[in-house]
């Protein structure tokens, strides 16, 4: 808690000083010039090029397979679910309870 309060006090003090600074525009311009002067490494170009190449390959491979333009007639399937007799239901219940050590069921 003490560290958070200290950080808030320092940042509020610096914010106040920054708002009232007489050469605020000059300082901001110097900071922006220093940021822009940094040269980009050549590896960043290869990273972006590799990413673009991977995206292009993905587009050529996945997109044509995603769209199936041929009209296929799907066969209709019918699911038949036979009803169980009451005796078979009781037998299945007994089998499901058969392997349990402790019986916590009604009958």
Image (tube, grey):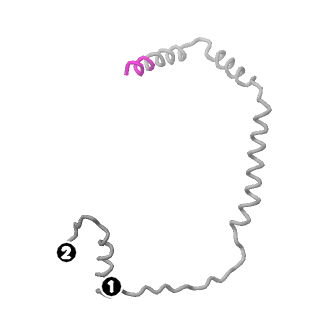
Q: Is residue 33 left or right of residue 83?
A: right
Residue 12 locus on image (x, y percent): 46, 18
Residue range corresponding to the magenta coloring: 1-7
Which residue is nearer to you in this view: 11 or 47? 47
Residue visible at 51% across and 86% down in the picture: 78
Which residue is nearer to you in this view: 103 or 17? 103
Residue visible at 75% across and 39% down in the picture: 47
Q: Up-down: is 66 above or below 5?
A: below
Residue 8 locus on image (x, y percent): 44, 20
Q: Secondary structure at mark 1?
A: helix
Residue 34 sits in which quadrant? top right
Look at the image and say whether residue 98 sits in the magenta stretch.
Answer: no
Residue 89 locus on image (x, y percent): 31, 82
In what quadrant of the picture does the N terminus appear? Answer: top left
Q: Up-down: is 56 above or below 89?
A: above
In what quadrant of the picture does the C terminus appear? Answer: bottom left
Single out the residue that lies furthest toward the top. 22
Residue 107 is labelled as: 2
Residue 44 is labelled as: none
Residue visible at 23% across and 67% down in the picture: 103
Residue identifier under label 1? 88
What secondary structure is the magenta-colored segment mainly? Answer: helix
Look at the image and say whether residue 2 sits in the magenta stretch.
Answer: yes
Closer to the chain start, of discs 2 and 1, is 1
């Amino acid at each position: 808690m003490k560290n958070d309060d200290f950080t808030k006090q320092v940042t509020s003090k610096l914010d106040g000083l920054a708002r009232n600074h007489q050469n605020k525009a000059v300082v901001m311009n110097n900071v922006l010039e220093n940021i822009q002067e940094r040269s980009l490494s050549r590896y960043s170009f290869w990273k972006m090029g590799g990413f673009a190449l991977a995206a292009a390959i993905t587009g050529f491979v996945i997109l044509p397979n995603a769209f199936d333009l041929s009209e296929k007639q799907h066969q209709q399937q019918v699911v038949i679910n036979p009803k169980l007799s009451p005796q078979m239901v009781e037998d299945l219940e007994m089998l499901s309870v058969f392997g349990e050590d402790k019986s916590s069921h009604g009958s």
